[in-house]
Structures are given as C-alpha cells and as structure tokens.
Amino acid sequence: MYVLDNPVLQRELLVNLRTNRAFLLLGIYQLLLAAVVLVAWPSDERLDLTTSPEAAKNLVNLFFLGQYVIASLMAPSFAAGAVTGEKERHTYEMLLASPLRPGAIVLGKMVASLTHLGMLILASLPIIVLCLPLGGVSVYEVLAAYLGLIVSVILFGAIGVFCSSYFSRTSSSLVVSYLVILPLVIAGVLFWQTLEGDGTLRLQIALLVVPAFLLSAVVLMCSAAAGRMLYPPDVGSEGKEVIDLEREAEEAVGLVIQPDQFPDRLFAPPKKQQLMPDGRNPVYDKEIHSEIFSQGTLMLRLVIQISMLLAIPLMGVFLFWQIERCAWFSVYVIVFNMLVGPVFLAGSMTSERERQTLDLLLTTTLTPWQILSGKFVVGFRISAVLTSFLLWPLLLGTALNNSFWSNWAAVLAMFLVVLVVCLVNAVLALACSLFSRKTSIALLSTYVLLLLLYVAPPALLSLGEILNFAPDVAARIEWLGISSPFSALFAIPLDQNLKLTFDDEPANVGNIAVVVGYFLFSCFLIAGATLAMVLRLRSRRGLGE
C-alpha cells in the first residue's frame, strides 16, 4: 500500500513522467552539464596525473555545486504543490475520504515528485565519470558527493511536501519552501568549500553525519504532514479550509499581524467598515481586501519571521565585521524579493481565469490601465513593505558604522538597486500572469526569467574566471551584467576606507558604467513589459476562457 500498490504514487508517476516536458527537461539538463564539462576540460596536451591537477578539482567542484544549487531550485517546484495541487483541483476532499493511509499519501506524493529530479541526477553519472581520469578526485569522494546530493534532494522534497500540507495555494507553499531551503543551501556550499583541503574529514561527514541528520528531519516532516492529513482542519466546499482571521491571530505563535496598527496596516488593511467611495479603483479595493488575505496570514507571518531571523546574523557579518563585503547583505535582500515578490502578482490575472471571472472583468467599463494598475499596486505594495523590513538593518548598520559615512553615495546606490529590483520583479510577475494560463506556470516562468536576467551573467563571469577565458570574452560577459542587480551591486565603487580583511588591497574601485547601464536596462524592461501588457488587454485576444 505504501510503495508497490500505492495508487497515489502510480498516478503521479504516470502523469509526471509521460509528459513532453519531462523528456525536454532531461535533455536540456544533460546538454547543459555536458557543455560545462566540455568548456572546462583542460586544454593541456599532456596531464601530469601524479600532481592532483587543480583544474580537475575545480571542474568537479563546479559540477557538484552547480547540481546542488539547481536541485535546491527544482525540488520545491516539484514537491510544493503535492497537497495544494489537490486543493486547487478540488479533489482534496475525495483524497481525504479514500481508504488510503495518510502516510501512504504523503510518501506517494513525495516519491513521485522527486523521481524525475532523481533521474536527472543519476543521468549525470556518465558525465562525471569522464572527469575521474583527470585525477585530483577519488571515486569515493564522487560517491559521497552523490549520496549527499541525493539526501539533500530528499530533504528539499520533504520540506516542500511539509509546507504544502499547511497552505491552500501552491504559490504560498513554494515561497515558504524556498525561504527554508535558502539557509540550508548556503550552509551546504560553505561546508563543501571550507573542508576542501581536508578530503578525509569531508568524506566522513558526508557519509556518516549529514545523511543521519537529514533523513531524521525528513521522517519528522513527513510524519507531521501525515498527521495533518489524519486530523485535517475544518474544510468547506471543494476542500477549502475555513479560516477565521481573529481565531488565527489568537492562536498564532510568535508574530501576530494586526491590521489596525502600524506597520501592519501598510500591507494588511483592516476590515471594511463602509462602502467603497466613488471614484476609487474597484480592482484595487477588491484585491487588497479579499484576494491576498482570504487564505489567512500564515504565509506572511512565516515570511517575515524567517527573513528577519536570517537578516540579523548577516547584518553582523557584512555590516560590522567584513564590511568590505557589505554588498552581500543587499544580495540577500534582492534574493528575498526574488522569491517573495512574484508570489503576490504571478496569480493576479491567472486567478481570474481559474475562477472563470476573467470574461466578466474584460466586459466591464474599466480600462486596461485601471485593471493593471489596481493589480500591480496591491502586489507591489505588499512585496515592497516586506522587503523594506530587511532594509532597516542595512540603514542601521551603515549609520552606526562610521566606515560607511564616506560611502554614503554607494549606500544610496544599494538602496536604489533594491528599489528597482522590486519594480522589475513585480512588473515581470504581472506580465507572466497575463500571458500564462495557470498561476503555477506564471510563477515558475517569472522565476526562470529572473534567473536568466539576474543570475546568468555573474555565473558566466565566475565560470570565466575559473576557466581563464580570453580577456575580450570576459569583457563581453561583464557587459551582460547590465541586466543583473548582483553585477550592479558589486560594480558600485567604494573608497579606500574599506579594506579587505585578509590583505592590504583596497576595496572595489567599481565600474560605474555597469551601474548606470543596469538602471537604464531596467527602465527599458519595465516600459516594454508595461506596453506589452496594455496592448494585450486592449486586443483581448486569447484572454477568454
């Protein structure tokens, strides 16, 4: 019932593995890994395998760390909709009423969601085997790395299923899963690189300690998810939970959102006490009072608490200890907005289509600009307020540390970069929502676009430094950074008061042209996406049911 005769597992495997997307993703993944190995392959005619070539170590580290980061991004996208997908498809009640045990349901959902990702990882074995003859890495280290990678994927999947059991929407489950996984990914990368010089110790920890702790966490989270399905909360029609906001606030542990007090009222407006005044945008009024908070405030409370918990130690490290790396705190703020911001806008238009109310909205007297502005302002308002909570540590740290007083222009540029990121993320999420059919597709499309714009240019630049690209090629890659706020942050010039920790080299002199280019590129991107959305709504083609 749990594995061999599990109908949930069988059904999910058939649905997930027989799609064209599964084969396409497998092919793209293998081609990408093969291309990286081909580009990074040493160009020496003869290799001295007795000296443990550094190029081989860099290649294997790049191979495994890249897979680890990719798996952390892909695992929640497969697992975070395991239970919420049943709620969104209105089949949750039937699943609860079936004779299946809760443990069998949870196990079937998690195994099915991770099977495709496991196939991707195992399919990369032939490629890494090609790197073993280069030397520098033993077969035992490769096996330990794969074991740690597979156990990490299982943990990420369990986190996704666990979060999915507590939310009614896949988007909420996905963003909370990413925020929980983010510190684990950082810890895993730091562990692998810190113990790079002691391969024996790293091998022992990866084989004995890490799997024990991670598998214990997996068992606990799966048990909690199964228990929630065994004793589910009150559900109404179509499996939707009955949420009382006042009771939720009374029973909440930790942070409690109070809409009638500052600053909570900035993103959680109080209940309406009177009719909507004349001349107000009805789309905005409806979205801010019903759409965002109709599913409770659990996701918002978790997002605020997790983000602030991570912000405190990062503020101490990057704003008071290693102050020359202050841009990394802004990187954390941007990553937070990348994960959270699109959630509030990726379902703006797709939710209307899923509720079959889009035709009614299009036949009203509202102009396309009123519809888009109402949707945009609500989502941008919430994501900007949540992101501003993380800007207070940046403001506090730069104000209390006199080393930043002569760098006020650089600090101001960091704030402007974060503001532009909030705008770009919101506009792209709204555009993906307008051009997509489902909220999950819109959200994942937004994440893919942001990764291509933000992460791809600095990743290519780092790859060029590892593989020693030609100077002209490296210069072209650097100019691709005008689409990435990360490249812009590290191109902001800092004066000589900020010294590196381990040597006497001055702080980054910066590249102001990349910073200016980023702002110009972002303005054109926002204008182009806005124009495309307005034209799409005016044409009204392909927007109906």
Image (cartoon, helix red, strand yellow):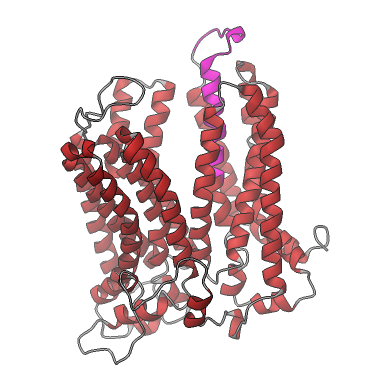
Asked if the magenta segment contains residue 41, the reply would be: no
Q: Can see residue 267?
A: yes
Q: Which residues are magenta?
A: 44-71
Residue at (83% x, 62% y) in the render: 5
Where, by quadrant of the figure, is residue 142 drawn? Answer: top right
Identify the residue at horizontal 66%, vertical 51% (top origin).
Answer: 217
Please give the name of the residue rendered at 43% of the width and 24% of the height, measured from the top-left corner.
466
The image shows residue 542, relative to residue 452, as above or below, that is below
Q: Position of residue 29 (x, y in %)?
A: 55, 41
Placement of the N terminus among the 4 image quadrants: bottom right
Q: Nearer the viewer, residue 94 or 37?
A: 94
Q: Judge left or right: residue 220 versus residue 545.
A: right
Left or right relative to 439: residue 219: right
Extreme residue toward the bottom, this view: 275
Image coords of residue 241 (percent x, y): 57, 79
Residue 68: within the magenta? yes
Please identify the quadrant where the C terminus is shown: bottom left
Which sits in the foreground, 440 or 51? 51
Q: Main secondary structure of the magenta part?
A: helix
Q: Position of residue 130 (x, y in %)?
A: 63, 24
Residue 96 to residue 380: above or below: below
Q: Residue at x 44, y 74 (%)?
A: 351
Residue 337 spot, x, y in % from top left? 37, 55
Q: Nearer the viewer, residue 190 or 456?
A: 190
